[in-house]
Image: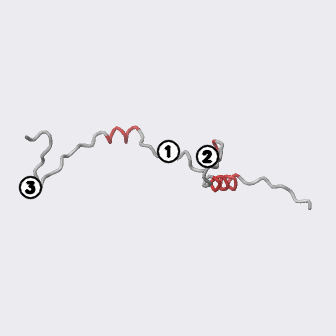
Amino acid sequence: MNEQYEEPTQDAAIFDKLTDILTPGYEVEFDPIEAELAGAFIEDALNEGDAAESGLDHFEPPLDDDGVSHGQDSK
């Protein structure tokens, strides 16, 4: 029995860790590269321009059955 030990590939190691993480109470550690490859740092936040533009949304008060707005400005 002269089997050689083969180091697992990075993909295989990440797959194993992602499988292990499903075990309740079991803590799995990822190094920064593994975490990035596993998708932990996918940036999906708004950029500055989109965030500024979203502040330009206007509130429109609901209309009653007659199509009349009863917002704070109408008394």
- Residue holding disc 2: 35
For badge 3, the amino acid type reads Asp
> Looking at the rendering, which quadrant does residue 59 occupy?
top left
Q: Using residue 4 as the reference point, say whether residue 29 is left or right of it.
A: left
The structure residue drawn at horizontal position 66% and vertical position 52%, both measured from the top left corner, is 17
Q: Which tag, 2 or 1, sits closer to the chain's start?
A: 2
Give the spatial CA distance, label 2 vs label 1: 13 Å
For badge 2, the amino acid type reads Ala
Give the spatial CA distance, label 3 vs label 2: 56 Å
- Mark 1 neighbour class, 10 Å CA radius: few under 14, some 14 to 19, many 20 or more: few
Q: Using residue 29 as the reference point, say whether residue 59 is left or right of it.
A: left
Q: In the image, which is nearer the foreground, mark 3 or mark 2?
A: 3
> Looking at the rendering, which quadrant does residue 30 occupy?
top right
Query: Residue pushed farthest bottom?
Result: 1
- Residue holding disc 3: 66
Quadrant where the C terminus is found in the figure: top left
- Residue holding disc 1: 43
Query: Residue pushed farthest front?
Result: 25
Instruction: Look at the numbered discs 1 and 3 and tell me whether their residues touch, using CB distance below 8 Å.
Output: no
The structure residue drawn at horizontal position 52% and vertical position 47%, both measured from the top left corner, is 42
Q: Using residue 32 as the reference point, say whether residue 50 is left or right of it.
A: left
For badge 1, the amino acid type reads Glu
The foreground one among 57 and 68 is 68
Q: In the image, which is nearer the foreground, mark 2 or mark 1?
A: 2
**Residue 45 placed where, x, y %?**
44, 43
Q: Which tag, 3 or 2, sits closer to the chain's start?
A: 2
Total of numbered circles in the picture?
Answer: 3
